[in-house]
């Protein structure tokens, strides 16, 4: 499964956020395929469509899609002293598919800030600079090697060109996620650089910050095109201890529609380029995770590899059409149930039944 690595300077609230994520974690019993590791939090992706399907099909249970967050032990100590990042830290970031930087916005005189003052912009730059430096080191080795290999016709000239373009972006002080848009994405992926991974920013905020829309707009603009989530990690960690009804009440008292962790799960899913299709029956209403752009057989393979190998066709009803019709039979009668073949590209919220040979 794809994972999002949580990084940030010391004392910004990473552990507090990660603890909240692990407490919000899905039950391992329902997800036997998920290996539960101490530094991974597998949280459910909120999807109100599942309850609607469960009601329509009288399903016994609901299985939401999940998003995995990895706590990348904060060995960023050297960062502000110019000592660079630890190797283990870098190796962990390399394994993650997206990077979530927690940044402190909350003002609390009792919690020391590593650089002496709360300044989200500086914090973001410190981490970005370290990752840029690490990528520069990687490329300074890779480019001469690729030059030789291209001369010997052992490497693709396109890959070398991508490496040189990436070098120029990094030398201009930009991450590849924000400045590398023109570089061929397949070559870029082969270079395995850290700053080409998508970023998400969590601004760990107190009540004053949650109410300060001007500050939020400023920070959103600063990190665009990355998603920005504003939450109070301490509050979130208390929220996950409550029963759903109590949690909703506490959120409402706080003037929030949705928990920060739910917003984060949604942003993470989106940032990873994922989407869901849905299945429903008397046993369960379930969301299945696929990449945007996947075809019907690829999607079937997520349920079982045999479904992909023996794929014949899929009966697809869009969620909205199914709800409007009120039942599968009514949707069929209204001509809203489509029979799709192996080239069909899945859409988010497709309600699907696969036909396959065994
Ligand atoms: P880490 O070093 O980034 O993992 O930070 P921690 O999660 O250990 O938090 C550092 C300190 O800040 C702890 O004393 C937390 O209780 C406190 N803290 C974390 N989040 C918040 C917050 O949203 N508001 C306030 N006031 N304190 C927080």
Image (cartoon, helix red, strand yellow):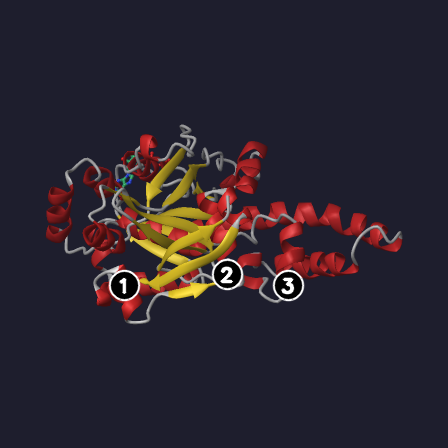
Task: Find residue 13 and report its horizontal and vertical position in percent.
Answer: 33, 40
Q: Residue at x 82, y 53 (%)?
A: 147
First-in-chain label (1 vs 3): 3
Q: Is residue 37 above or below residue 253?
A: above
Task: Tell me if 260 is positioned left or right of 352 in this view.
Answer: left
Task: Find residue 273 and report its horizontal and vertical position in percent.
Answer: 46, 56
Q: Residue at x 43, y 47 (%)?
A: 100
Quarter of image, ligand 1: top left
Q: How many residues crowd mark 1 within 10 Å: few (<14), some (14–19), many (20+)?
A: many
From the viewer's perspective, is the residue at label 1 or at label 3 nearer? 1
Mark on residue 322? 1
Task: Tell me if 335 is positioned left or right of 143 in this view.
Answer: left
Task: Tell me if 135 is positioned left or right of 224 in this view.
Answer: right
Q: Pick the residue in front: 296 or 334.
A: 334
Quadrant in the rendering for residue 4: top left
Task: Tell me if 122 is positioned left or right of 243 in this view.
Answer: right
From the viewer's perspective, is the residue at label 1 or at label 2 nearer? 1
Q: How many residues crowd mark 3 within 10 Å: few (<14), some (14–19), many (20+)?
A: some
What residue did someone put label 3 on? 183
Q: Residue at x 49, y 47 (%)?
A: 307
User: How far, Cα to Cα, is label 3 from label 2?
Assistant: 20 Å
Q: Can you see residue 82?
A: no
Q: Pick the residue in front: 149 or 68.
A: 68
First-in-chain label (3 vs 2): 3
Disc 3 on helix, strand or loop?
loop
Q: Pick the residue in front: 131 or 350.
A: 350
Quadrant in the rendering for residue 196: bottom right
Q: Are marks 1 and 3 in contact (CB under 8 Å)?
A: no
Disc 2 under 8 Å from ligand 1? The reply is no
Task: Find residue 211 and report its horizontal and vertical position in percent.
Answer: 20, 58
What residue did someone put label 2 on? 293
């Amino acid at each position: 499964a794809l994972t999002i690595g949580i990084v940030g300077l010391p004392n910004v609230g990473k552990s507090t956020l990660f603890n909240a994520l692990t407490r919000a974690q899905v039950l391992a019993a329902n997800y036997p395929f998920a290996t539960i590791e101490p530094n991974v939090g597998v949280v459910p992706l909120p999807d109100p469509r599942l309850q609607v399907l469960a009601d329509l099909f009288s399903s016994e249970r609901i299985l939401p899609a999940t998003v995995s967050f990895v706590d990348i032990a904060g060995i960023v100590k050297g960062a502000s002293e110019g000592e660079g990042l630890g190797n283990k830290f870098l190796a962990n970031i390399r394994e993650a598919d997206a990077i979530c930087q927690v940044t402190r916005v909350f003002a609390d005189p009792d919690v020391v800030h590593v650089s002496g003052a709360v300044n989200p912009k500086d914090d973001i730059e410190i981490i970005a600079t370290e990752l840029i430096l690490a990528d520069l080191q990687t490329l300074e080795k890779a480019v001469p090697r690729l030059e030789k290999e291209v001369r010997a016709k052992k490497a693709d000239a396109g890959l070398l060109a991508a490496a040189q373009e990436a070098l120029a972006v990094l030398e201009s002080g930009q991450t590849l996620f924000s400045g590398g848009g023109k570089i061929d994405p397949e070559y870029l992926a082969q270079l395995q650089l850290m700053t080409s991974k998508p970023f998400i920013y969590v601004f760990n905020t107190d009540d004053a910050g949650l109410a300060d829309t001007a500050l939020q707009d400023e920070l959103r603009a600063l990190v665009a095109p990355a998603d920005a989530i504003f939450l109070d990690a301490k509050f979130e960690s208390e929220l996950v201890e409550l029963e759903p009804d109590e949690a909703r009440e506490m959120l409402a008292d706080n003037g929030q529609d949705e928990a920060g962790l739910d917003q984060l799960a949604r942003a993470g899913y989106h940032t990873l380029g994922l989407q869901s299709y849905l299945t429903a029956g008397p046993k369960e209403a379930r969301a299945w995770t696929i990449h945007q752009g996947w075809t019907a057989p690829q999607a079937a393979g997520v349920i079982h590899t045999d479904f992909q190998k023996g794929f014949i066709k899929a009966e697809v009803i869009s969620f909205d059409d199914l709800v409007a019709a009120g039942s599968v039979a009514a949707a069929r009668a209204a001509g809203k149930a489509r029979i799709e073949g192996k080239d069909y590209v899945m859409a988010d919220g497709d309600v699907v039944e696969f036909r396959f040979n065994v």
